[in-house]
Image: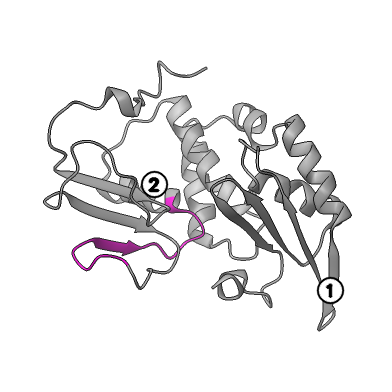
Amino acid sequence: MYAADLPFILVSEIPKEPITSVTLVDTQSLVTIKGLSKKSQVFVIDHHKKKDELPPHWEFTEVETSSCTTYFVEQMIEKNNYTLSLIEATLLLLGIYEDTGSLTYANTTARDASAVAFLLSNGASLNIAADFLNPPLSIEQQNLFEKLLENAQTVSIADKNIFISSAEAPDLGDEVSSIGHKIRDLLDPDALFIFVSIQEGIRLVARSTSEQIDTSKIAR
């Protein structure tokens, strides 16, 4: 829909020449593609803790905010070197909103909110963002949503309600996190943990609305 404004390329379109450097954002897993070699520099920017098994020659930057996008927005503000189109500003806004539940998750920081304010002042469209933040579930996602509700357990610990469920979805081609958002909006638990078995392995979605529940520690 916005291809003209966002010049991403397909893997097949990468020039057939050596890749000198790669920057990984919000992940610490590198997919092998043609042109990569042991000489390629790898830079990681992530708001998750550094993995112990990360290659020692990779350069790691830990972002202490709820969204990696906030880090990039702060870099633009600091260097005062930016010109954002409406679509670019909205894309960055979506990155922060998706990671922070539109600034409602318990681990949202003031820095995330400041980045959102900057983007709004630079033309980000809330109308366009709203179209992408809560998309309707696909048929496969709806089926998985129903399975997770059927298989659910609700555990009460220290007066906190924890939603736990698992299901198999070997043919799922869509993401699981949006299903977690739907369950969270429907049942409003203090935290939820969803395990979904797909062809590639098991996906875990963990969300918390309480500062007393650190889902990152529990996930580890």
Instruction: State whether residue 10 is above or below residue 199.
Output: above
Q: Quadrant of residue 212?
A: bottom right
| Side of 72 relative to 173 (left or right) | left
Dominant SS of magenta comes to loop
> Earlier along the polypeptide chain: callout 2 or callout 1?
2
Q: Which residues are magenta?
A: 54-68
The way the protein has been coloured in the rendering is: one colour
Residue at the image position 65 percent from the left and 43 percent from the top: 170
Residue 155's disc is: 1
Residue at the image position 84 percent from the left and 60 percent from the top: 152
Q: Is residue 27 visible?
A: yes
Q: Amino acid at mark 2?
A: Val
Q: Position of residue 195 (x, y in %)?
A: 68, 58
| Side of 40 relative to 102 (left or right) | left
Residue at the image position 51 percent from the left and 43 percent from the top: 95
Q: Is residue 137 visible?
A: no
Residue 73's disc is: 2
Check contact, mark 2 vs mark 1: CB within 8 A: no
Query: Distance of mark 2 from mark 1, alpha carbons?
Result: 39 Å
Q: Mark 2 vs mark 1: give the one in front.
A: 1
Q: Amino acid at mark 1?
A: Val
Question: Foreground: 107 or 15?
Answer: 15
Q: Residues within 10 Å of mark 1 (few under 14, many from 20)?
A: some
Whether residue 61 appears in magenta in the rendering, the answer is yes
Q: Residues within 10 Å of mark 2 (few under 14, many from 20)?
A: many
